Image: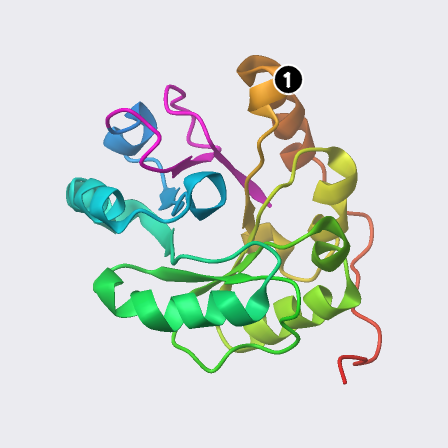
Amino acid sequence: MRFLLPIGGVVDHRYGILTSPAHTGTPAGIVVGMDWAADNDSFKRGFAPDVFFPWLDGLMPYRDTCLFVTVPDALGDADKTLNLYREWYQHFTGWSLAFVAQDGLERLPAVDFDVLFIGGTTEYKLSNTVAHLIQDARKSGKRIHIGRVNWHKRYNHFALMEGSEEFTCDGTRTRFDGAQRTIRAWTGYMAQRPLHRVIPDGDSRG
């Protein structure tokens, strides 16, 4: 499972870059060809289309290395997130799109998307429901991204899942543990191989 770094000044192709309008300019890693993804900043300040879309247009020269762009979502609210997705996804023509799974989502939504982004509260993120969503998404040819993976326990939870070597993830650990300490820890996590694979329990989603 590969980390997307939320910082702009690191050039290391073992990682990718998670960028947003909060970054000043284009991160150096993106310029030199690292894979990257775009966050919509909904969690921090609420989605601001007048800021977001001009910023995204500025990244058009690097679209070939873009893994996904996250369509606006609402923390912990699957219904509101689905409504936001239906409202905005047509404005993202030409980009690979991520739909964010939030609390209450029990089955894959009937909308067109490329990446299932696992968001939501900790309880939801670690639930068997989400494990099933990931399994279903992979069967449907979707890629998987996990949000808020800061420490080894959570990294290992998802790394044990079938197909996790193709997952990406991100975290906010750099904000409180420093960039270099965080990168050293994440490098160690990525170097470890899971000892066992986890298959979700029987379907209990109702």
| Visible residue check, residue 59 | yes
Amino acid at circle 1: Asp
Query: Eyeballing the image, is 187 above or below 73?
Result: above
Judged from the image, the secondary structure of the residue bearing numbered disc 1 is helix
| Visible residue check, residue 142 | no
What stretch of residues is rendered in magenta?
1-25
Q: Residue at x 24, y 30 (%)?
A: 31
Q: Is residue 8 magenta?
A: yes
Q: Which residue is mark 1?
A: 177
Q: Residue at x 70, y 49 (%)?
A: 159
Position of residue 145 in the picture relative to residue 66 (left or right): right
Say which quarter of the image contains residue 204.
bottom right
Residue sitting nearer the eye, 83 or 151: 83
- Residue 78 image point, x, y percent: 57, 68
Q: How many marks?
A: 1
Residue sitting nearer the eye, 42 or 60: 42
- Residue 11 image point, x, y percent: 38, 23
